[in-house]
Amino acid sequence: MLNCLTVLLVLITAYYAWQTHQIVKEMQKTRRIDFLPIISIKTEQIGQDVVEISLMNIGKGLAQNVQVFFPTCDNEPRIIKSLPPFVDYSGFKNIECVAVVHFVCLDINRIIALNDSERILTVKYKDIFNEKIISETLILQDEVKSKNFKRPYLKTEGWSMTF
């Protein structure tokens, strides 16, 4: 009888240990999500041949080794060492966390002629836990409507993240 109770107590203890391990894993996931950098991407065409890309970290964690790729314009990535969060924990808005990079597009009309799915802007970066994150957005064509003319330009709409 005593052996049966000992075995039962060992099984109950093992079950509680397993449950505690599951709780710790969930807490670790939550901590990683809480400090996840989320980079918002905005593009604007400036002049005839320059595309300006503004990046803002709207997450709570630091984005490190930020690389901006716009291969339809230029094969060389633009690199930003780090991008701090826009709002810190005291509620202070950090204006210095907005980074702007430029791509000079030699033939903007060739880019405008591409399908929307071919005009992809990719931003790769790491969080404080050294996890790689990729954000992508489509650069869509729109028109600037002024008094008597229409001029095509490129803009950003929507974005997605993958880990």
Image (cartoon, helix red, strand yellow):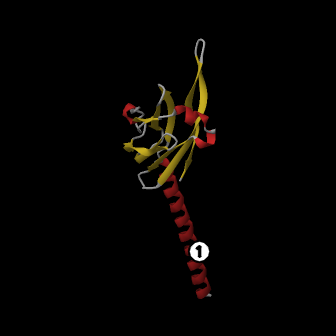
Q: Position of residue 77 (x, y in %)?
A: 43, 45
**Residue drawn where x is 52% and y is 41% of the image:** 72
Most foreground residue, 33 or 145: 145
**Residue drawn where x is 52% and y is 61% of the image:** 25
Most foreground residue, 91 or 70: 70
Instruction: Give the residue pinned by disc 1.
Output: 12
The quadrant in which residue 9 appears is bottom right
Q: Is residue 108 above or below residue 147?
A: below
Is 124 on the left or on the right of 148, as rendered? left
Most foreground residue, 147 or 107: 107
**Residue lying farthest to the top in this orientation:** 147
Q: Amino acid at mark 1?
A: Ile
Q: Is residue 156 visible?
A: no
**SS category of the residue bearing label 1:** helix
Q: Position of residue 91 (x, y in %)?
A: 42, 34
Q: Position of residue 4 (x, y in %)?
A: 62, 85
